[in-house]
Image (cartoon, grey):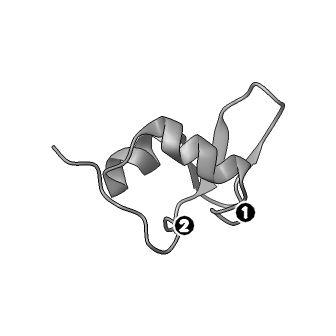
Amino acid sequence: MSEAIGTREFAEKFGVTPATVSKWCREGKIPNCNQDGKESPWHIPKDAVPPVGYKRRKK
């Protein structure tokens, strides 16, 4: 994987919570994201997009 971002950066970019991003990664809804180990942070491709039909968090 060339460029990767973390769950927090992805969450801020798309207006969702980091917990939601982690859930999407676990469920395979964001392609090509991975972890070094079970408890390590997710590595998400910089050009990844949220799943179809996601809702931005209200401010």
Q: Residue at (31%, 51%) from the top-left corner?
A: 15
Q: Is residue 29 left or right of residue 21?
A: right
| Quadrant where the N terminus is found in the figure | bottom right
Image position of 42 with respect to 10: above or below: above
Image mark count: 2
Q: Residue at x 34, y 46 (%)?
A: 12
Q: Residues within 10 Å of mark 2 (few under 14, many from 20)?
A: some
Measured along the vertical axis of the image, is residue 23 above or below residue 31?
above
Q: CA distance from mark 2 to mark 1?
A: 8 Å
Towards the viewer: 57 or 12: 57
Residue 53 image-quadrant placement: bottom left
Looking at the rendered structure, the kind of residue marked 2 is Ala
Residue tagged by mark 2? 48
Dividing the picture into quarters, in which one does residue 28 lie? bottom right
Q: Which mark is residue 5?
A: none
Q: Determine the secondary structure under disc 2.
A: loop
Amino acid residing under circle 1: Asn
Residue 23 percent location from the top left of the image: 61, 45
* 47 is higher (above) or lower (below) than 15: below
- The image quarter containing residue 37 is top right
Q: Position of residue 14 (x, y in %)?
A: 35, 57
Q: Are marks 2 and 1 in contact (CB under 8 Å)?
A: yes
Q: Which residue is mark 1?
A: 32
Q: Secondary structure at mark 1?
A: loop
Q: Position of residue 55 (x, y in %)?
A: 35, 61
